[in-house]
Image (cartoon, rainbow, N blue to C red):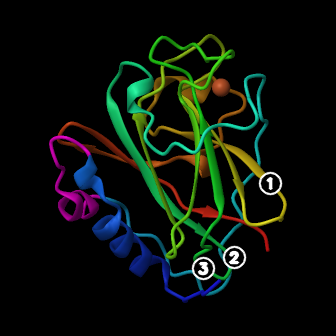
Amino acid sequence: MQQTKFNRRDLVAAGLAAAGFAALSPPVPALGQGAALPLTPSCDGKAAVTRRQTEGPYFTPSSPLKPDLRGDGAGEMLALSGFVLTPQCRPVAGALVDLWHANVGGDYDNSGFRFRGHQFTDAQGRYQFLTRVPGLYPGRTRHFHVKVRAGRGPVLTTQLYFPDEPGNTRDGIFDRALLMAISAAEGGRLGRFDFVIAG
Ligand SMILES: [Fe+2]
């Protein structure tokens, strides 16, 4: 596995340029949207490992290899992308990223694999899911569930949140360290989150 060291600002620019948002229809202006994202600090070899969160009751193992979940139901489109990084900010190629979430009505598919899928980061450590904005269900704010694993390493189980979501302050599980950077795009929203996993 080849690893190339970047600082975090480089990664933001590279990721948005190459994340393939043209797969959305209509295409979104990737770099123009990127300019609206907050700049991330240089890593300096000390990036904080992404915080773990509860798996919740609705995880189903052995999800399909499926980075495009848009066909699994209705709702506003969202492209979720980012890097999997080591604490030294080195991109991790071939890392498993497994995503599951509720549909627009707030329901999980507990008998099949709608809005459940996994993929592996590319040679630059990037992942991208095309999906729909999850709906709300009682007791929780809006969120994604994710598991990340590099090779045979430990599994990072966590959740991702939406900024400016009214339910965030009422959800005892919510953690602002797990907020995605969300920006509006033509045809949907862009969500950005970089996972930092322990070696
Ligand atoms: Fe959930």
Quadrant of the rendered image holding ligand 1: top right
Q: Is residue 1 left or right of residue 190?
A: right
Q: Secondary structure at mark 1?
A: loop
Q: CA separation, marks 1 and 2? A: 15 Å
Q: Are marks 2 and 3 in contact (CB under 8 Å)?
A: yes
Horizontal and vertical percent for residue 110?
Answer: 68, 16
Which residue occupies 53% across, 28% down?
115
Query: Ligand 1 within 8 A of label 3's CB?
Result: no
Mark 1 or mark 2, whichever is nearer to me: 1
Q: CA separation, marks 2 and 3? A: 5 Å
The residue identified by callout 3 is: 89
* Dot 1 crowding, Cα within 10 Å, few <14, some 14–19, many 20+: some
Give the dominant element type of the magenta stretch: helix, strand or loop: loop
In the image, residue 89 sits, relative to residue 26, either above or below, namely below
Q: Residue 88's image quarter?
A: bottom right
Horizontal and vertical percent for residue 66?
Answer: 52, 42
- Please tell me whether residue 29 belongs to the stretch shown in magenta: yes
In the image, residue 32 sits, relative to residue 27, either above or below, namely below
Which residue occupies 41% across, 19% down?
73
The residue identified by callout 2 is: 87
The residue type indicated by label 3 comes to: Cys
The residue identified by callout 1 is: 155
* Dot 3 crowding, Cα within 10 Å, few <14, some 14–19, many 20+: many
Nearest the eye: 152 or 29: 152
Q: Secondary structure at mark 3?
A: loop
Query: Ligand 1 within 8 A of label 1's CB?
Result: no
The boundaries of the magenta stretch are 24-36
